[in-house]
Image: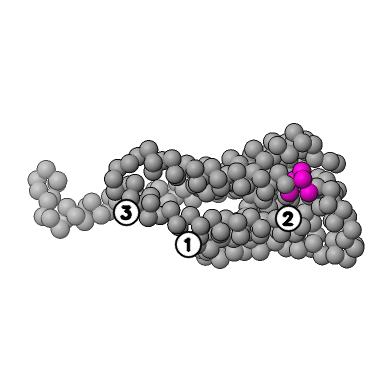
């Protein structure tokens, strides 16, 4: 498949929106789950978009920016995973590994902006001190739009401008190298989920993880919807149990407070 100019412009427009959303962390449209799905819709292959979305989202699940450090960029990773898989005919697993150079390139561009924009910090402080709302807003919007335009330009050049060279390069890979990318792409979601569990894992929730793992791997379903329903049911059970415990603890604290304060006839003490 060849990416048309119209499709390239649509992807660039979405990259512009996603790039600004990543910069501001507003609606989380920059997550691979959204980026891959929308890219798949633009390219006319929703199934590929959704499959790539699940794999790429798991890959980036545990990669979070901390301070000035930045993980590989999820927007370019999501876009290029779908584009490479669609244009070269490779699987989404293989395309994840092949999309990493584009993701890392955008990572360095974002880091450059972090450093370059620090030059405007003093000016923004002066605008804020003088309550110069118009100049403050104008500069903030200008820099944010610049970031969005950079995302759009890099995405357009990667998706449309360099598609011929990219397709020729990927198709020239020997079978052993392509197989290696496929294996790496299959491992990356497990690594990403493992990084997420490293930060969020609690022993009290281990039973839920085992139930979900067993349901997904050993029970034959036509799709994963039953597993999702089981997850929702377990989440509701945990929610109502925790709320009941919270209300009980709150009531006991109120009684303890009354007992310590001596109470009164109106309190029944």
Q: Nearer the viewer, residue 122 or 104?
A: 122
Marks 1 and 2 sit apart, C-alpha to C-alpha, by 25 Å
The residue depicted at 29 percent of the width and 51 percent of the height is 250
Q: Is residue 170 magenta?
A: no
Query: Could one spot residue 58 in this view of the protein?
Result: no
Residue at disc 2, secondary structure:
helix
Q: Position of residue 249 (x, y in %)?
A: 32, 54
Q: Nearer the viewer, mark 3 or mark 1?
A: 1
Residue at disc 3, secondary structure:
helix
Marks 3 and 2 sit apart, C-alpha to C-alpha, by 50 Å
Q: Position of residue 72 (x, y in %)?
A: 63, 59
Residue on which the image places disc 3: 249
The residue depicted at 79 percent of the width and 36 percent of the height is 4
Segment colored magenta: 158-162
Query: Could one spot residue 131 in this view of the protein?
Result: yes
Q: Crowding near pointer 1: few (<14 within 10 Å), some, many (20+)?
A: few
Q: The N terminus lies in which quarter of the figure?
A: top right
| Secondary structure character of the magenta stretch overall | helix
Residue on which the image places disc 2: 99
Residue that protrudes farthest toward the top in the picture: 6
The residue depicted at 83 percent of the width and 46 percent of the height is 87
Location of residue 67 with respect to 154 vertically, above or below: below
Picture quadrant where residue 225 is located: top right
Of labels 1 and 2, earlier in sequence is 1
Residue 67 is marked as 1
Q: Is residue 163 left or right of residue 10?
A: right
Q: Position of residue 93 (x, y in %)?
A: 77, 55
Location of residue 42 with respect to 53 vertically, above or below: above
Contact? badges 3 and 1 (CB < 8 Å)? no
Of labels 3 and 1, earlier in sequence is 1
Picture quadrant where residue 49 is located: top right
Q: Nearer the viewer, residue 85 or 118?
A: 118
């Amino acid at each position: 498949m060849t990416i048309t100019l119209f499709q390239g412009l649509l992807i660039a427009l979405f990259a512009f929106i996603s790039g600004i959303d990543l910069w501001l962390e507003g609606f989380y449209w920059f997550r691979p789950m959204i980026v891959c799905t929308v890219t798949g819709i633009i390219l006319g292959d929703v199934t590929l978009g959704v499959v790539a979305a699940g794999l790429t989202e798991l890959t980036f699940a545990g990669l979070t920016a901390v301070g000035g450090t930045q993980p590989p960029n999820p927007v370019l990773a999501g876009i290029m995973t779908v584009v490479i898989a669609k244009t070269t005919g490779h699987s989404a697993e293989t395309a994840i590994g092949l999309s990493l150079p584009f993701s890392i390139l955008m990572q360095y561009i974002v880091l450059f902006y972090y450093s370059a924009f620090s030059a405007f910090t003093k000016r923004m402080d002066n605008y804020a001190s003088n309550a110069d709302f118009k100049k403050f807003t104008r500069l903030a919007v200008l820099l944010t739009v610049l970031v969005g335009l950079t995302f759009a330009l890099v995405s357009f050049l990667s998706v449309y401008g360099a598609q011929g060279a990219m397709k020729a390069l990927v198709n020239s890979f020997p079978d052993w190298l392509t197989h290696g990318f496929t294996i790496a792409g299959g491992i990356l979601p497990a690594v990403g989920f493992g990084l997420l569990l490293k930060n969020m894992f609690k022993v009290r929730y281990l039973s839920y993880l085992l139930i979900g793992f067993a349901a997904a791997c050993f029970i034959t379903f036509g799709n994963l919807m039953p597993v999702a329903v089981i997850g929702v049911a377990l989440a509701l059970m945990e929610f109502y149990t925790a709320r009941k415990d919270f209300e009980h603890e709150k009531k006991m604290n109120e009684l303890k407070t009354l007992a310590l304060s001596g109470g009164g006839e109106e309190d029944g003490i």
